[in-house]
Amino acid sequence: MSLNLQPNIPDPDGFYQELIDSQRDMTDAQAQMMNCKLVLVLANHIGDREVLRAALEVAGGRIGPA
Amino acid sequence: MLQTYSYPKFAYRQSAEQKEGRVARHPVVVIGAGPIGLTAALDFGRRGIATVVLDDNDTVSIGSRAVCYAKRPLEIWDRLGCAAPMVAKGVSWKVGKVFFENDLRYTFDLLPEADHRMPAMINLQQYYLEEYMIAACAELATVDLRWKHKVISLRQEPDHVVLTVETPDGVFTMEADWVVACDGANSDTRKMVGAEFTGRFFQDRFLIADVVMKADFPTERWFWFDPPFHRNQSTLLHKQSDDVWRIDFQLGWDADPEEEKKPEKVIPRLKAMLGETTEFELEWVSIYQFACRRIDDFRHGRVLFAGDAAHQVSPFGARGANTGVQDIDNLGWKLKLVMDGAAPEALIDTYNEERAFAADDNLLQSTRSTDFITPKSEMSRRFRNAVLELAADHAFARPLVNSGRLSTPTPYVRSSLNTPDEDIFAGGMVPGTNCADAPIAVAGESGWLLHHLGDGFTVMTFGSVPAKTVAAGAISAKVLSVGDDLVDTKGRVAERYDGRPGTTYLIRPDQHVAARWRSFDAAKIARAVARACVA
């Protein structure tokens, strides 16, 4: 399995709203903690180290040090 | 401060060579009589090597220091005849608990497999450990322990080392075919040979306190992340013998070591943790900071490095002394074969190959634990805390909790001394792995498998074979038949070694698997012995 970077979420606007709503009443610190937990929960669900490594590269690739 | 232990003072004696003003050549000189140097003395001495040990002090470890000893080092000390008092005096444990803030988040069990002679882990103050090893050294005519002997300089010649040594009677010169430096993380010997000692330093400080108290904490390892009594830092509690408890407090980089060591600073921290009403006395306090680093090469000419002199790890996981003992386990038989002319000097280079491999594994484990315990950024702290919060309710997060991965041996899976498998085997006894123990019986007397391995090369074979030994060059490997020479009383030998009739293992003198086959073939065994000796 390789990392799927094609649209894969049904009802994307609905999902995005759900994501933002889930943190609407949180402080930044709480939301950051939730984000960390979310990363861990999703990473465990994926499990595949190759896919996770590819995701880390996609997510961090243009942000990290040049 | 209270003293549950009275430190012995070992008599300095002027050596005959110093008194007579002659330069003597010794087969091996060990520098440092800590746990690793003493293990070296016992291992070399029992292999028949006349061993001189030099130590600049005249007592055992001040303070409890290393504390945790794992199964493999205990097995090595058992081979060297000194494990029984350690296990008897030490505190065996197997359960660890991890707390975050106010709550228990995770419990682990080292789950020791049944039917091993040695426990998974014991806690014992380092001074007891050293005392027992010093007593064992006294039983060996081959070991010459010299207190108040400080090496002040060292010169390498092509086939020996010249040491300048200072004693209360002045300075004298001695020579050694080989020097084994076990003089700790701040090794002067390492500086004398100009070795590199590089790695990562951690900007953090820890307070360790030995506390005497009658407490009803269970015999478990308790680790707190960010507890209410010590906010934003970690704390570790371990039980030792004599009602002495080891408590580690993470202090952070800004802490002033001299200030933090004062009882008026330490006691309030302990009261916050133990409660105002718990009665305790402080026995020993120390502040440390740590690094994860290793020497560039374990061999510098005729000087070999072992223990903290060769590698320094963070204390989480008890990988310091435990790894050092395994360095010596690896070195002793190689040195003996080379000294006897039974193997070429190149065998000594495999000491670096195998133990640097193990050191790198330990450094990796230790660095990972340290990154979890002392996060280096705000975001990594958040991830760490997220793992700890999730661990209470969700099994998936528990393997991510890292309060120190406890020391286990690193198999030499890539060693050039191994003969690769040509047959199919199940289980973990792959070439390069230390042999698993198992209960056995010999002539109706119950005993343990490891007691029959380690005296030279051993060919362990399941069933009867016509040979009693297999010759390979100058080396003769003893045949040990499971069935004829010993009885596999509980079937554990067959289970752990995937043994069937004909299955044959070649086992090194350090109780590691060198090769294995599904049938006994003397020619193949002889080739594998030669390979394991670089012959």
Image (spheres, helix red, strand yellow):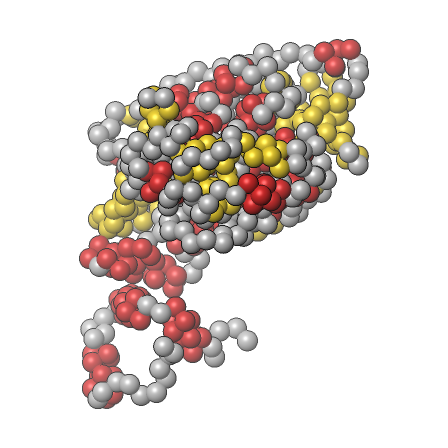
Provide residue B406's location: percent of width, then percent of height.
39, 43
Residue at the spot 31% in from the left edge and 71% down from the top edge: A46
**Is B346 displayed left or right of A61 in the figure?**
right
Q: Is residue B384 left or right of residue B313?
A: left
Q: Is residue A23 above or below residue B302?
A: below
The residue positioned 56% from the left and 23% from the top of the image is B46
Which quadrant of the structure image shows residue B18? top right
In this picture, is B488 found above or below B366? above
Answer left or right for B481 relative to B347: left
Q: Give x and y (percent) for residue B113.
A: 30, 40
Q: Residue at x 37, y 24 (%)?
A: B442
Q: Which residue is rendered at x = 23% and y = 74% of the image?
A: A23
- Give the tally of numbered discs: 0
Quarter of the rendering containing residue A56 = bottom left
Q: Position of residue A19 (x, y in %)?
A: 24, 79
Which quadrant, please, contains the N terminus of chain B? Answer: top left
Q: Which one is nearer the viewer's eye here, B36 or B230?
A: B36
Report the front residue among A13 and B480.
Answer: B480
- Report if residue B164 is visible in the image: no
- Give the position of the C terminus of chain B as an image quadrant: top right
Note whether residue B403 is visible: yes
